[in-house]
Image (tube, rainbow, N blue to C red):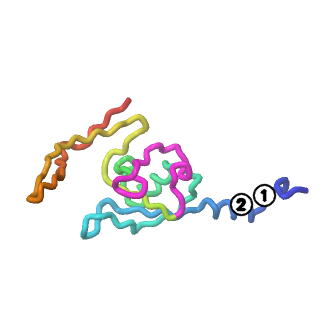
Protein backbone atom coordinates (compact mmCIF):
# COMPACT_ATOMS: atom_id res chain seq x y z
CA UNK A 1 0.00 0.00 0.00
CA UNK A 2 1.40 3.37 -1.04
CA UNK A 3 1.46 6.20 1.51
CA UNK A 4 -0.62 8.36 -0.85
CA UNK A 5 -3.36 5.70 -0.99
CA UNK A 6 -3.89 5.35 2.74
CA UNK A 7 -6.89 7.05 4.38
CA UNK A 8 -6.31 10.38 6.08
CA UNK A 9 -5.76 10.15 9.79
CA UNK A 10 -6.50 12.69 12.47
CA UNK A 11 -2.77 13.60 12.43
CA UNK A 12 -2.89 14.27 8.69
CA UNK A 13 -5.81 16.62 9.19
CA UNK A 14 -4.04 18.34 12.09
CA UNK A 15 -0.86 18.86 10.04
CA UNK A 16 -2.90 20.28 7.16
CA UNK A 17 -4.71 22.66 9.52
CA UNK A 18 -1.43 23.77 11.10
CA UNK A 19 0.13 24.34 7.67
CA UNK A 20 -2.73 26.68 6.73
CA UNK A 21 -2.95 28.50 10.07
CA UNK A 22 -1.86 32.11 9.95
CA UNK A 23 -1.66 34.96 12.41
CA UNK A 24 -2.94 38.20 10.91
CA UNK A 25 -2.26 41.55 12.55
CA UNK A 26 -4.34 44.64 11.90
CA UNK A 27 -4.81 48.13 13.26
CA UNK A 28 -7.74 49.81 14.93
CA UNK A 29 -8.70 52.67 12.57
CA UNK A 30 -9.97 54.74 15.51
CA UNK A 31 -6.53 54.94 17.13
CA UNK A 32 -3.19 55.96 15.64
CA UNK A 33 0.22 56.35 17.25
CA UNK A 34 1.55 59.79 18.21
CA UNK A 35 3.25 60.18 14.82
CA UNK A 36 0.03 59.32 12.94
CA UNK A 37 1.06 55.85 11.83
CA UNK A 38 -1.07 52.76 12.43
CA UNK A 39 -0.22 50.33 15.20
CA UNK A 40 -0.85 46.72 14.22
CA UNK A 41 -1.69 45.68 17.76
CA UNK A 42 -4.65 43.36 17.17
CA UNK A 43 -3.95 39.79 16.10
CA UNK A 44 -6.30 37.02 15.09
CA UNK A 45 -5.69 33.45 14.00
CA UNK A 46 -7.21 32.32 10.73
CA UNK A 47 -6.97 29.63 8.10
CA UNK A 48 -5.48 31.03 4.88
CA UNK A 49 -7.77 28.75 2.84
CA UNK A 50 -10.79 30.76 4.01
CA UNK A 51 -12.16 33.61 1.93
CA UNK A 52 -11.60 37.33 2.38
CA UNK A 53 -15.28 37.53 3.37
CA UNK A 54 -14.55 35.31 6.41
CA UNK A 55 -11.62 37.52 7.43
CA UNK A 56 -13.71 40.69 6.99
CA UNK A 57 -16.43 39.22 9.22
CA UNK A 58 -13.86 38.37 11.93
CA UNK A 59 -12.29 41.85 11.78
CA UNK A 60 -15.72 43.54 11.85
CA UNK A 61 -16.66 41.51 14.94
CA UNK A 62 -13.35 42.26 16.66
CA UNK A 63 -13.58 46.02 16.02
CA UNK A 64 -17.38 46.16 16.53
CA UNK A 65 -17.85 47.73 13.07
CA UNK A 66 -20.40 47.10 10.35
CA UNK A 67 -19.28 44.68 7.63
CA UNK A 68 -19.15 47.42 4.97
CA UNK A 69 -17.91 50.32 7.13
CA UNK A 70 -14.19 49.87 6.55
CA UNK A 71 -11.58 49.37 3.83
CA UNK A 72 -8.94 46.65 4.06
CA UNK A 73 -5.50 47.09 2.50
CA UNK A 74 -2.68 44.59 2.30
CA UNK A 75 0.44 45.53 4.30
CA UNK A 76 -0.14 49.27 4.84
CA UNK A 77 -2.02 52.46 4.05
CA UNK A 78 -0.70 52.53 0.46
CA UNK A 79 -1.17 48.80 -0.10
CA UNK A 80 -3.55 47.15 -2.51
CA UNK A 81 -7.19 47.30 -1.43
CA UNK A 82 -8.52 43.84 -0.66
CA UNK A 83 -11.95 43.72 -2.24
CA UNK A 84 -12.71 40.35 -3.89
CA UNK A 85 -14.60 38.80 -0.99
CA UNK A 86 -14.81 35.32 -2.51
CA UNK A 87 -11.07 34.92 -3.08
CA UNK A 88 -9.13 32.73 -0.60
CA UNK A 89 -6.59 34.50 1.59
CA UNK A 90 -3.68 32.43 0.27
CA UNK A 91 -4.44 33.56 -3.30
CA UNK A 92 -4.39 37.19 -2.10
CA UNK A 93 -0.92 36.66 -0.63
CA UNK A 94 -2.08 36.78 2.98
CA UNK A 95 0.00 34.33 4.94
CA UNK A 96 1.38 34.03 8.45
CA UNK A 97 2.43 37.32 10.13
CA UNK A 98 0.76 39.47 7.47
CA UNK A 99 -0.39 42.99 8.32
CA UNK A 100 -3.77 44.24 7.12
CA UNK A 101 -4.37 47.99 7.22
CA UNK A 102 -7.92 49.01 8.21
CA UNK A 103 -9.38 52.45 7.47
CA UNK A 104 -12.88 53.85 7.75
CA UNK A 105 -14.79 54.15 4.47
CA UNK A 106 -16.87 52.32 1.93
CA UNK A 107 -14.98 49.39 0.42
CA UNK A 108 -14.69 49.13 -3.34
CA UNK A 109 -16.33 46.28 -5.14
CA UNK A 110 -14.78 44.41 -8.07
CA UNK A 111 -15.17 46.71 -11.10
CA UNK A 112 -15.04 49.91 -9.03
CA UNK A 113 -12.41 52.57 -9.63
CA UNK A 114 -11.51 55.33 -7.20
CA UNK A 115 -10.39 58.64 -8.63
CA UNK A 116 -8.47 61.11 -6.48
CA UNK A 117 -8.14 64.71 -7.60
CA UNK A 118 -5.14 66.82 -6.54
CA UNK A 119 -3.66 70.20 -7.41
CA UNK A 120 0.11 70.10 -7.84
CA UNK A 121 2.09 73.22 -6.92
CA UNK A 122 5.76 73.54 -7.86
CA UNK A 123 7.81 74.80 -4.94
CA UNK A 124 11.25 76.37 -5.45
CA UNK A 125 13.57 77.01 -2.55
CA UNK A 126 16.66 79.25 -2.37
CA UNK A 127 18.92 76.63 -3.95
CA UNK A 128 16.73 76.49 -7.08
CA UNK A 129 15.68 72.96 -6.23
CA UNK A 130 12.12 72.30 -7.25
CA UNK A 131 9.72 70.05 -5.44
CA UNK A 132 6.03 69.49 -5.76
CA UNK A 133 3.30 69.94 -3.17
CA UNK A 134 -0.04 68.18 -3.68
CA UNK A 135 -3.36 69.46 -2.35
CA UNK A 136 -6.13 66.91 -2.09
CA UNK A 137 -9.31 68.36 -3.62
CA UNK A 138 -12.12 65.94 -2.87
CA UNK A 139 -12.98 62.64 -1.35
CA UNK A 140 -12.39 59.76 -3.76
CA UNK A 141 -15.08 59.38 -6.36
CA UNK A 142 -16.14 55.79 -7.01
CA UNK A 143 -17.18 54.72 -10.47
CA UNK A 144 -18.46 51.27 -11.32
CA UNK A 145 -18.16 49.67 -14.72
Q: How far across and how far down the image is residue 116, in percent?
A: 26, 42
Q: Kindly identify the residue that appears in the image at 32 percent across and 59 percent down.
A: 29
Gap in angstroms between the C-alphas marked 2 and 1? 7 Å
Pick whichever, 35 or 13, lies toward us. 35
Q: Kindly identify the residue that appears in the image at 10 percent across and 57 percent down.
A: 125
**Is residue 108 covered in magenta?**
no
Residue 8 shows which numbered tag? 1
Q: Residues within 10 Å of mark 2 (few under 14, many from 20)?
A: few
Q: Residues within 10 Å of mark 1 (few under 14, many from 20)?
A: few
**Is residue 77 covered in magenta?**
yes
Q: Which image quadrant for residue 32?
A: bottom left
Pick whichever, 66 or 31, lies toward us. 31
Q: Main secondary structure of the magenta part?
A: loop
Residue extending furthest toward the top: 145
Segment colored magenta: 73-96
Name the residue that disc number 2 marks: 13
Badge 2 vs badge 1, beta-carbon distance below 8 Å: yes
Residue extending furthest toward the front: 127
| Helix, strand or loop under label 2 | helix
Amino acid sequence: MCIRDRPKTKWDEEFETEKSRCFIRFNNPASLTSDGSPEYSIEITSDNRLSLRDLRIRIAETLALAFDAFIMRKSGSFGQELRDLDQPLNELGIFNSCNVYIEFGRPSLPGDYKLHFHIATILTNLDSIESVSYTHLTLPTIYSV
